[in-house]
Image: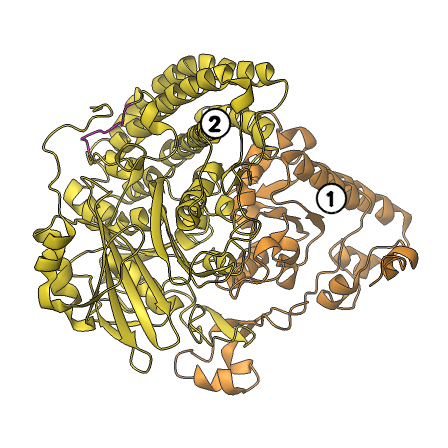
Chain colours: A orange, B yellow
Amino acid sequence: MSSEQPRQQIYDSTAPSTDTRDSRIGEGADDRFNSKLREAFGSTPFILTKFDKFMNWVRGNSMFMLQFGIACCSIEMMHTYAIKHDLDRFGAGVPRASPRQADVMIVPGTIVSKFGPRMKRVYDQMPEPKFVVGMGSCTISGGPFQEGYNVVKGAEEIIPIDIHVPGCPPRPEALVYGIAKLQERIRNGESTPVVVKPYELEEFGDLPQDELVQKLADDIDEEDLVMRYNWADSP
Amino acid sequence: MSTGLERGGQPPIEVTEDDLEALIGDRALARDDHMNAPGFVIRPDDVQSVLTDLRDEAGFDHLANLTAQEYADRYESIYHLRKYDDPTQEVSVVVPTTTDDPVSQSAEPVFRTADWHEREAFDLVGIDYEGHPDPRRILLPETWQGHPLSRGYDQEKPQLVTLTEHANPVQPDHHDDESDTMFLNIGPHHPATHGVLHIETVLDGETVVDVDPDIGYLHRCEEQMCQQGTYRHQIMPYPDRWDYVSAGLLNEWAYARTAEDLADIEVPEYAQVIRTMGAELCRIASHMLALATFALDVYGDFTAIFQYGMRDREVVQDILEDLTGQRLMFNYFRLGGVAWDLPEPREEFIEKTRDFLDELPAKVDEYNDLLTGNEIFQIRTHDTGILEPEVAKQYGCTGPVARGSGIDYDLRRDDPYGYYDNLEWDVVTEDGCDNYSRVLVRMQEVEESAKIIEQCLDLLEDWPEDERTVQSNVPRTLKPDADTEIYRAVEGAKGELGIYIRSDGTDKPGRFKIRSPCFHNLSALPEMSEGEYVPDLIASLGSLDIVLGEVDR
């Protein structure tokens, strides 16, 4: 490309490219906020709207984080929790060791094939509404390890992510900013859709019968949960 | 206790190449010398007898590394042997096997550490080891198809990964009234595993009967990444991410040392002093985190010691940020020196670092009051997690883990590099062999590192203004001669961090193998914890101070 021609994304539109995200998330309304109440009462009653707002305010200001360390970023995450940066100041600093007590999961590191199903399991165990902050380049695209045979190209292949914090690793200040942004979104009642396409846990028996499945038929039980790791088809 | 820079006791026996040739005799098919050591090619069914002779007759008691690789016409396993008494004495045993039937004899009966290494070689390269007690995959999921570091592996093919409930290996049903044992999974998501480690444990009451660490949850293909990068600049960022607990400069040094020796690059003395200072700052940061998380593991102290450790790390990270421009992933070393000189104004940087060193003794006293002098802590850690020196050597343990078992082994002194030779400091050893000794070793190493930094600062301050060369002249593209092989190691925060590189005549390594200290130290965990209580298992794991990024690479 000659340098006289500016790149298309520069002169066409200043909006961020969302192709990758759109291919990862499916269609459908997001039902993470008070969906049961809305179903029962409809969406218009005045009191319910105010209660929604109140609940969102409460959620945004009292977040329990999941104590979840994967890789390099977890060191900076610990520094964010600890003195000097002290995430507690923002109403979001109690790391809980059990996913059943946590609202927010910070994914601090590279996801590899073997850990993918485990992370999905941990995410599934969190009570709703739940939010995810992807920390570092690895959770965006695989980061410096994207070309690795064993690396999942971004945590969004497996679980939905509300906020991405870029960096390798992001500074604690950046993570604090990311969490403050998440709180803002929660307060405003915004969130990203929950459905994620590429990596799903499925029972082995339900998989389409292809060469790989037939090869592994003796090793894996019909009812075992499996995840298909497909490096080439990831965005 | 400490021995000073001069080793005590008997000087190690010198073994010349002629002795080795005589010892191996007819079993040597050919010679395949490496840059660091003489190499002997032997037949795949002579592995045990040759390694036994080298260990018992010639004193090579340390299987530092096992490299597996595939050539166009053969597979090759290289056993890198050295001595705990004198790591500059090395020998490589090269075992070629055919491509159609890659079967080689297992070295596990001679060196216990070969167990995990051979599993890794099978997993990533595809060599079978005959007589191996447990031939399973180690890093990749059990259901993985193919061997990713072998030639002709197609990484675009889909794979299936299972999420199974783990079965009780001793009893079919762990709710059975008759059964005395219970199966317990610790991890991969667990606060005490320091990352994503999975430990399969079998308990009898509260006593640990069987421990099997299951690793590979952070296997991010570091070796593949390094094999795809060019020597000059593209590899250096990756070492930062092996042992990511702020030990970045120590890891970078491992690569810098190996590549500099491979391509014959000189490093200016001034750069060596900066490297030494930066590396020791990293060691302090790394040991601080080890102490902080150990306190968290042993008595759940999230408020005092953990936060103190973090506070002190912040100071070190600030200093390192001034020096390198990054808090954690420094990418500061270059082949032939460092990226840039000390930050300006230099006096300010030196003063800031001196302030940190001045405050350090008071902080260490604080840790001693809180931690090592604490009665609860002593009860928890004394005489738990015993690792006898002979066992530690069998598993290839190095670093504070080995020094806590009384093994006097520190590459900074025994295989000198950088500026360590010209400085006054001591190697710390403790004879307790238990969790407490390992903590004590780390506490004292922090003080020794401070001594080294102090001396480096003095040197840097008085260095002649016109001799402050930070980098030597290095060719833009490095292409070491084809088939040059080298294994070099440095003393990382966790122990001997070694790298094996085979060049293939291009500007990228043909094979890049990382010898990780945590991998060896973790493999000794069953020896330390079987027969003890389950809380002691957690304490032992904490005292090993593993980093999963380095275990799994």
Horizontal relation, residue B24 to residue A165: left or right: left
Which residue is located at x 47 percent, y 51 percent?
Answer: B189
Question: Mark 2 Cα within 10 Å, few/some/many (few <14, many 20+)?
Answer: many
Tag 1 subunit: A
Residue B185: give x, y in percent of width and height.
Answer: 37, 56
Q: Is residue B161 above or below residue A89?
A: below
Question: Mark 1 Cα within 10 Å, few/some/many (few <14, many 20+)?
Answer: many
| Badge 2 amino acid | Tyr
Residue B523 part of the magenta-drawn span: no
Horizontal relation, residue A13 to residue B438: left or right: right
Q: In this view, does A90 lie above or below A199?
A: above
Which residue is located at x 11 percent, y 50 percent?
Answer: B58
Residue beneath disc 1: A182
Residue A21: give x, y in percent of width and height.
Answer: 74, 62
Q: Which of B230 and B280 is in front in this view?
A: B230
Residue beneath disc 2: B270
Residue B231: numbered disc = none
Horizontal relation, residue A135 to residue B155: left or right: right
Q: How far apart are marks 2 and 1 (CA)?
A: 47 Å
Quadrant the N terminus of chain B occupies: top left
Which residue is located at x 24 percent, y 36 percent?
Answer: B409
| Badge 1 amino acid | Leu
Question: Element under label 1?
Answer: helix
Q: Is circle 2 on the same chain as circle 1?
A: no
Tag 2 subunit: B
Quadrant the C terminus of chain B occupies: bottom left
Residue A183: give x, y in percent of width and height.
Answer: 74, 41
